[in-house]
Amino acid sequence: MLSQSAFIHNYLMNNNQPHLSISKLSTLEKKLSKDSEHYASLLAQAFAVDSKLFQLPPDDFAKNIDVFLANQRSLHGKTLADLSPIEKKSSQVETLANTLSNFLEDQILANKMKPGDKLPSDRNLAALFNVGRTSIREALKVLNVLGLINILPGQGTFIASDSSEFFLTPLSWTFFLGDKNLEHVISVRNVLEIESARLAAINATIEDLDNLELIFEQSKRAYLERNYQHFVNLDLDFHLSIAQCSHNPILSNLLQTSRKLIKHISKSGMVNIDNLNAVYQEHSLIYENISQHRNDEAVLAMKNHLENAQIRYSL
């Protein structure tokens, strides 16, 4: 929504001198020219995105700009008031309890809260999640029974100090509270992913493979339609579906947790179209080998995918 002059001033300057004139920019906006690639490259540098993004058709560009710019945004520094309210579901206490649990988990992972910290009042929580105070109180009772929080009459509600049950689904809390060594967490994730692929190829039932196929086909459709945001969103679903095919629920829970932790620690993102193309090819090979029950090949395909991922994400 910037004027052409403001756009040039913000993104196309070199030593306080504009790279191009307003008339030149107007020409570029109307049609491609021999200089288009050059200015696209300058903009890509300014926004720290892949220059190929500017080669997409306008509709695809608009559809995918968020996924390529996501790496430029950070949730760190937001206050509770900045968080988006969750849709009101007053009759579903269990859903709200799960939402609160995930909220606390994210706050801990972002170093905004820690064991023993006092939670916001039920009035503030109700406003944050856009639900009634009664629903909040009922949800907090559930978390109290689960051992995730301690409700102390007259004092308030606190995150449990001894919280081995907090991440039972997906994992014990101690996994998150130790030193956040990214290299070690990635090693654990890799072991889980590889074993997940091996067991999936061996144990997957027809129903399991139908579910995996459904997610893979959704991912494939998103990729072919250049809906990269949806494609990226389905990445976790694809890997967790493989874990479910393994028929080892503990492995599945551990894998979900390790992936979430890596996301919080690394702050890196998939902002390169070539990376997206590679991920699609690698996922295709993994899916094919699992669906054909080729466990050795599934392991190799997953190993290759993970090794390439570490390079892609600069982990």
Image: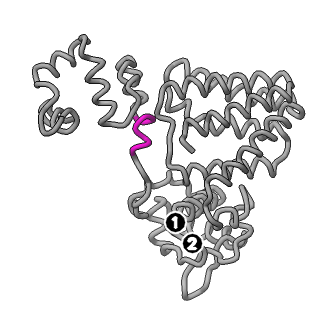
Q: Secondary structure at mark 1?
A: loop
**Residue 288 shown left or right of residue 127 in the figure:** right
Q: Secondary structure at mark 2?
A: loop
**Residue drawn where x is 18% and y is 35% of the image:** 14
State the residue position of label 1.
Answer: 111
**Residue extending furthest toward the bottom:** 154
Tag count: 2
Quadrant location, the C terminus: top right
Question: Do tag 1 and tag 2 residues touch (Cβ < 8 Å)?
Answer: yes
**Residue drawn where x is 71% and y is 49% of the image:** 187
Mark 1: few/some/many CA within 10 Å (<14, 14-19, 20+): few
58, above or below 195, in the image: above
**Residue 285: x percent and y percent?**
72, 22
Camera-nearest residue between 71 and 126? 71
Check residue 114 in the rendering and tell me which mark sits there, or answer none: 2
Q: CA distance from mark 1 to mark 2?
A: 7 Å
**Residue drawn where x is 67% and y is 27% of the image:** 283
Camera-nearest residue between 93 and 191? 191
Quadrant location, the N terminus: top left
- Three-letter amino acid code at disc 1? Asn
